[in-house]
Image (cartoon, rainbow, N blue to C red):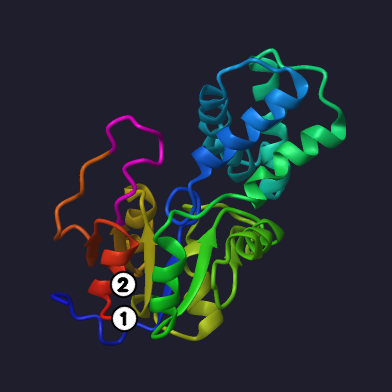
């Protein structure tokens, strides 16, 4: 490794888009539901629309418009708005709830599980996600994600980019912020983590938003590690 990371103890990971392919998973379950219920809509557009209001709904919690509300419940509010936007009706409450829980069943990117297993052999690994604890736990069991534990915004009842979320791992594991590395495919997440003293690793996920041209790799000196995928990340960590 070019960067001195000898004192690194723990890696924490953004999950949606970085570890799991949320978009393809939501599209696949939507298409299955559509066939069963005769709902003929563009499920890719539906998935994108549902995800596009993720940040605005979390901001309602951050600015006090809503009390603390875990992500499952925000997703359910977002789902209601998205179903209405796409003119989807006739779903029972149970069917809506099952669709909402698609976020518990997201499929990992093909390189995620084997690479995490390699990284875990040397470091403590955990999600550091806006997803609530039950969501992260069910996702891990479904996808075989080998986390050592699950750290969530729910632990501090604040959403990223609140400092309390990024400082959760150092505080709980009695390590310095610079001994924790945040791994994400999203630069805004990494920049916030770095601001609070964490090391940073960018992992490229050009297909997160579908077959459109994804963002280019950032300059290699912008973060402690810039990796083209999780296998590259594991190699650069010498695991």
Q: Is residue 97 above or below residue 124?
A: above
Q: Quadrant of residue 94?
A: top right
| Magenta stretch, overall SS | loop
Residue drawn at x 56%, y 78% is 148
**In the foreground, 97 or 133:** 97
Residue 224 visible, this orientation: yes
Residue 65 placement (x, y as % from top left): 67, 36
The quadrant of the picture occupied by the C terminus is bottom left
Q: Which of the numbered marks, if any, corresponds to residue 61?
A: none
Q: Which numbered circle lies on residue 239?
A: 1
At mark 1, the secondary structure is loop
Q: Residue drawn at (54%, 58%), measured in percent from left and top?
A: 129
Residue, disc 2? 234
Q: Decide if residue 225 is on the left or right side of residue 205.
A: left
Q: Pick the residue in front: 118 or 214.
A: 118
At x 59% / y 45%, what residue is drawn?
Answer: 62
> Range of the magenta residues?
203-214
How far is disc 1 from disc 2 in space, using C-alphas?
Answer: 6 Å
Q: Is 106 drawn above or below residue 234 in the view shown?
A: above
Q: Residue furthest top?
A: 87
The answer to whether residue 211 is magenta is yes
Mark closest to the chain's N terminus, 1 or 2: 2
Mark 1 near mark 2, Cβ–Cβ under 8 Å?
A: yes
Determine the image quadrant of residue 58: top right
Q: Nearer the viewer, residue 33 or 224?
A: 33
């Amino acid at each position: 490794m070019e960067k001195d990371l000898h004192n690194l103890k723990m890696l924490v990971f953004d999950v949606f888009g970085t570890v799991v392919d949320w978009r393809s998973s939501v599209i696949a379950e939507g298409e299955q539901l559509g066939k069963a219920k005769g709902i003929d809509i563009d499920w890719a557009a539906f998935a994108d629309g549902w995800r596009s209001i993720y940040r605005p709904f979390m901001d309602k919690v951050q600015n006090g418009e809503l009390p603390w509300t875990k992500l499952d419940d925000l997703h359910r509010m977002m789902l209601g708005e998205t179903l209405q936007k796409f003119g989807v009706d006739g779903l029972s409450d149970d069917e809506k709830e099952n669709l909402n829980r698609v976020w518990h069943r997201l499929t990992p990117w093909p390189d995620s599980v084997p690479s995490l297993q390699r990284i875990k052999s040397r470091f403590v690994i955990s999600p550091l996600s806006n997803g609530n604890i039950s969501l992260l736990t069910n996702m891990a069991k479904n996808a075989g994600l080998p986390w050592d534990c699950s750290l969530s915004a729910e632990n501090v009842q604040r959403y990223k980019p609140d400092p309390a979320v990024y400082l959760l791992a150092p505080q709980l594991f009695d390590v310095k912020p610079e001994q924790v590395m945040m791994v994400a495919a999203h630069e805004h997440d990494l920049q916030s983590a770095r601001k609070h003293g964490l090391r940073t690793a960018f992992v490229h996920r050009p297909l997160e938003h579908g077959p459109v041209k994804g963002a280019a790799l950032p300059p290699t000196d912008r973060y402690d590690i810039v990796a083209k995928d999780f296998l590259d990340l594991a190699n650069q960590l010498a695991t």
